[in-house]
Image (spheres, rainbow, N blue to C red):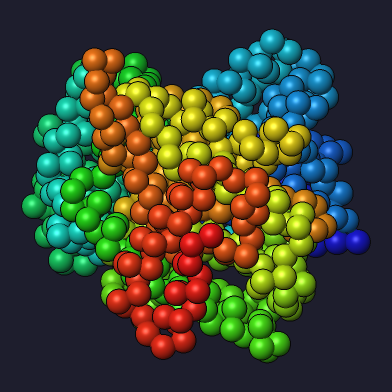
């Protein structure tokens, strides 16, 4: 039985009792609503032992529950075993929401406590509305991460900030600030508060290493016509960065001064806040000065400019060369019967990627799942789970890199030439969905949820499905998961616009057997203009072969076969001049027509 988290939960419950808190809700985020928070804000991990990037912990006097989505069902089941924490499978019709569970299990008049810097305005409003109906109070001033609960809490990140040069960014910080303020003006605001770290990095053309895999700096940003302030640790700033910010008329203040500063603003200042990203305590501090709406920077950041698109294409080519070299090496080692494990895969990928120009780091932790581990959507090999790789099952590799000129994310499923008929059938169903989405043409204004079923239909027709999204936005030398656009079952409200980069990654996961995912990144581009308006389509950016041995041509249409053959011909034409010897031989074989 795992008792390592028990003392932490006991300390939290003592703190809750001292403040009259019947339940507390602890998300996996920070005051910037980051997907991957720095260690300083990893309270949920500290209290539960669960390491997934999505999940919320609820603690009462006698219960502890963790809500997480389908990507982490298997992982959470294993990591929570013996902790006394119950896993709640978020997204299933049979699973109540956190608010529903609290209303059903807490008596009227009790109080739920949350840290209001860790919950967005939208999240807090939703929770408060549900709790109010049940006569339950919400205290947004409760701070669960007390020293008694987390005595060895890591310090705030202190990595230096550096400049993302204009040749890669394609637009100056001053021009971006002007565009952000223009968006705010359309919403009736004369100032903007930005807490999302990738939006700050994009706006100011700065980067850092405060968050693993995400080249961002911890901070808040306030912008108005006459006052522009970056709130961050001053020790992070070099003279060069200070000069860069001064050129854009941005001054710097200490990270911890943000609420004091916002509270001192004149009453005639109207500050635009993002409902989904700004903390509820920020709205409370501003009071009537707050205008709650959409982010003024998100759409600007999501639509890449010509320099960013050009850089991303160049990064994709270098990444494709590295992937081909790595897959050739992996395939050769396995077929020779050499010792190779799941944990060897990330090292091989990084070695080849790091040899390319402008490489900075991995864009996320590599997923290398062999056989049953491939069915764990966000599996990461560890010494106690590390499996040897051989030709007896499928290997799923999901990896990516951050380059100064672009970010990559690619998934390939590999058979080493000995796939079963069932595996080939399942792989081909996934690829039929991938191809359908890659070939989609859609009218201006189309949002991702309207295309999502295209990728799922081949699986649905056989009563099969996957529960994660089909596509997420991708940043430019920023976060590998970027909004506001996505391709998923639920509507996120953002249209797919030319210049947006999104993933195309349907999958299928059979618990205890194998997993399949096929992912490329695609760029939205103009397709045609007719009497009915403008239409868009996708340009596939990723350059790397799919495993030919996994295709079952008997269930593919001629158009689908042609798409694969055309794609592989393009991969060969682009990459073959950049590889040689055994790698070139492998690439030639891997890209032969089906």
Q: Position of residue 161 (x, y in %)?
A: 28, 63
Q: Between 43 and 335, which is closer to the camera in this rendering?
A: 335
Instruction: List x then y, in percent, for residue 226.
Output: 11, 34
Which residue shows up at 82% across the image and 46% down it?
A: 85
Q: Does the image show residue 316?
A: yes
Q: Is residue 485 above or below residue 87?
A: above
For the point 69% across and 33% down, which residue is it? 460
Residue lying farthest top?
133
Observer-nearest of 138 and 44: 44
Residue 29 visible at all: no
Residue 338 in which image quadrant = bottom right
- View extreme (left): residue: 247
Residue that lies at the very extreme toward the right in this rendered image: 1
Q: Residue at x 35, y 74 (%)?
A: 576
- Vertical position of residue 261 compared to residue 163: above or below: above
> Can you say whether 130 is above or below 17 in the image?
above
Quadrant position of the N terminus in the picture = bottom right
Of residue 111 and residue 127, the one placed in the foreground of this image is: 127
What residue sits 64% from the left and 60% below the top? Answer: 550
Q: Is residue 123 left or right of residue 262?
A: right
Q: Position of residue 66 (x, y in %)?
A: 74, 42
Residue 93 appears left or right of 483 = right
**Residue 205: where, in percent of width, then height?**
22, 53
């Amino acid at each position: 039985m795992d008792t390592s988290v028990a003392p932490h939960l006991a300390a939290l419950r003592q703190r809750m009792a001292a403040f009259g808190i019947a339940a507390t809700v602890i998300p996996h985020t920070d005051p910037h609503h980051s997907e991957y928070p720095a260690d300083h804000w990893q309270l949920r991990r500290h209290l539960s032992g669960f390491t997934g990037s999505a999940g919320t912990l609820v603690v009462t006097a006698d219960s502890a529950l963790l809500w997480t989505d389908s990507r982490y069902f298997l992982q959470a089941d294993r990591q929570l075993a013996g902790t006394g924490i119950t896993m709640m499978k978020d997204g299933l019709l049979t699973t109540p929401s956190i608010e529903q569970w609290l209303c059903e299990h807490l008596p009227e008049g009790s109080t739920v406590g949350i840290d209001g810097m860790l919950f967005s305005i939208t999240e807090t409003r939703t929770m408060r509305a549900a709790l109010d109906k049940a006569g339950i109070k919400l205290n947004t001033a409760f701070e669960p991460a007390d020293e008694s609960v987390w005595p060895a809490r890591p310090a705030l990140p202190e990595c230096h900030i550096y400049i993302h040069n204009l040749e890669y960014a394609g637009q100056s910080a001053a021009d971006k600030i002007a565009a952000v303020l223009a968006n705010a003006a359309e919403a009736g605001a004369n100032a903007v508060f930005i807490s999302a770290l990738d939006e700050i990095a994009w706006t100011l053309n700065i980067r850092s290493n405060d968050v693993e895999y995400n080249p961002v700096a911890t901070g808040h940003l306030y912008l108005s016509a006459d006052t522009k302030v970056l709130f961050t640790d001053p020790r992070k700033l070099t003279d060069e960065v200070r000069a860069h910010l001064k050129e854009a008329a941005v001054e710097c203040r200490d990270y911890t001064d943000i609420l004091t500063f916002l509270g001192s603003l004149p009453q005639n200042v109207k500050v635009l806040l993002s409902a989904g990203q700004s903390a509820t305590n920020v709205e409370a501090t501003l009071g009537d000065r707050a205008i709650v709406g959409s982010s003024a920077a998100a759409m600007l950041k999501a639509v890449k400019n010509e320099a960013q698109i050009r850089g991303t294409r160049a990064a994709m080519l270098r990444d494709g060369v590295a992937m081909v070299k790595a897959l050739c090496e992996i395939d050769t080692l396995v077929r020779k019967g050499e010792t190779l494990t799941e944990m060897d895969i990330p090292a091989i990928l990084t070695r080849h990627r790091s040899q390319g120009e402008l490489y900075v780091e991995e864009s996320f932790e590599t997923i290398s799942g062999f056989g049953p581990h491939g069915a764990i959507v966000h599996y990461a090999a560890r010494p106690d789970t590390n499996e040897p790789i051989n030709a007896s099952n499928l290997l799923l590799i999901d990896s990516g890199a951050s380059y100064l000129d672009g970010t990559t994310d690619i998934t390939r499923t590999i058979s080493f030439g000995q796939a079963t008929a069932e595996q080939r059938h399942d792989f081909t169903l996934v690829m039929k969905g991938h191809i359908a989405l890659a070939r989609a043409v859609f009218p201006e204004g189309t949002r991702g949820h309207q295309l999502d079923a295209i990728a799922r239909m081949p699986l649905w027709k056989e009563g099969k499905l996957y529960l994660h999204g089909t596509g997420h936005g991708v940043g430019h030398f920023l976060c590998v998961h970027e909004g506001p656009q996505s391709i998923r079952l639920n509507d996120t409200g953002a249209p797919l616009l030319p210049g947006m980069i999104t993933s195309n990654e349907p999958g299928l996961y059979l618990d205890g057997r194998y997993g399949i995912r096929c992912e490329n990144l695609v760029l939205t581009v103009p397709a045609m203009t007719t009497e009915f308006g403008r239409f868009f389509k996708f340009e596939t950016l990723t350059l790397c072969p799919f495993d030919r041995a996994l295709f079952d041509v008997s269930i593919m249409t001629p158009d689908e076969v042609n798409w694969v053959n055309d794609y592989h011909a393009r991969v060969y034409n682009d990459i073959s001049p950049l590889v040689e010897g055994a790698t070139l031989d492998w690439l030639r074989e891997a890209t032969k027509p089906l």
